[in-house]
Amino acid sequence: MLNDEHIELRKSVEEFAREVVAPVIGDYYERCEFPYEIVRRMGAMGLFGLPVPEEYGGMGGDYFALCLALEELARVDSSVAITLEAAVSLGAMPILRFGTDAQKERWLPKMAAGEILGAFGLTEPGGGSDVPGGMRTTAVLDGGEWVINGSKAFITNSGTDITGVVAVAAITGRREDGRPEISTILVPSGTPGFTVSKKYSKVGWSASDTRELSFTDCRVPEENLLGERGRGYAQFLQTLDEGRVAIAALSVGLAQGCVDESLGYVRERRAFGQEIGHYQAIQFKIADMEARVHTARLAYYHAAERMLAGLPFKKEAAIAKLVSSNAAMDNARDATQIFGGYGFMNEFPVGRFYRDAKILEIGEGTSEVQRMLIARELGLPA
């Protein structure tokens, strides 16, 4: 059950999404333009600071509050939702979880206010899901500074005008068994040697910012190390477990948005003399869509509940992410079919939903990776 604060938050974000985002986001999407004004208003609402303690300028809420906000935003648009998700769960949370007091004081207040965005530099062009095996970015200590060389791919929020810092995973040495020692280093935007590429031309999430990054003899102070040296990969695994719950919530929002749009359309569209909502074929399709949403929502609620209780939740997060992303993709396909030719037009939300859904089965761990994690948690061989 949601408490009163969660209910009020959900209502306020639902109204914001419907009244502020919905009327304009289609134009941003068509232009592939980052929605700075919407982001500014989200910052004024406190959405970027939902799980950040009040001492750092946040709302002092919990991670579940962030998930509820993501679900409501994604019912209308996923570009806005992923901007918030990446900024908080991938940008701010690693600093909150692992940063020094000085790092938290420097970065979190502006992040919580939405004045700057943080990014999460993990994936590399040749790496994909094999993060340790595919990592080539290195960082070497030289005269009290980290010297970083390498590149990152598919990094959200990394090249906006308000991007403030990127947490970069890099190989900082080798362990006795030859495995790479991976550490995380904070690189402020504008640091010499840190280059941001042009925006990708993407299938979906067209109003969000995603870029490739490169580092050429990029120097930052030694104290920019985030957490313990050699613990970078473990830190990111924890971050990804939490992020999967957030992506599951976003996926549920998109899947719910497909139901919302379809219900409105079938009451207006007429064929063969009556509203198409009278036909059992349409009714059964929408019933299946609603069942997927309900199941997926319960899955992410359960994962979030275990996370907030301090219980192991890796398996539950993987299940939630797998089930919810499948629901989003299936519902987007069915909603497009219900809309017919209009569903293939970007001016209709379901057209955007269809384009946006596929990445949910890929980002923050593919569906195949989620199945692998679930199997390992059941005790099957790695």
Image (spheres, rainbow, N blue to C red):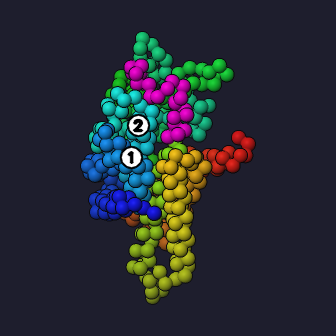
Does the segment drawn in magenta span residue 37?
Answer: no
Q: Is residue 337 visible?
A: no
Q: Residue at x 55, y 32 (%)?
A: 233
Q: Secondary structure at mark 2?
A: helix
Does residue 177 appear to the left or right of 127 in the view shown?
right
List the residue tagged with mark 1. Answer: 51
Element carrying mark 1: loop
> In whole angstroms, how far apart are the C-alphas of marks 2 and 1?
10 Å
- What is the magenta range? 214-239
Earlier residue among tags 2 and 1? 1
Q: Is residue 381 above or below residue 346?
A: above
Q: Please name the residue that numbered disc 2 is placed on.
A: 96
Position of the C terminus, as image quadrant, is top right
Instruction: State the image coordinates of residue 192 (x, y, percent, origin top left).
Output: 36, 22
The residue located at (42%, 11%) in the rendering is 143
Residue 177 x %, y %: 67, 22
From the viewer's side, name the closer residue of 353 and 81: 81
Residue 19 screen position, x and y as percent: 28, 63
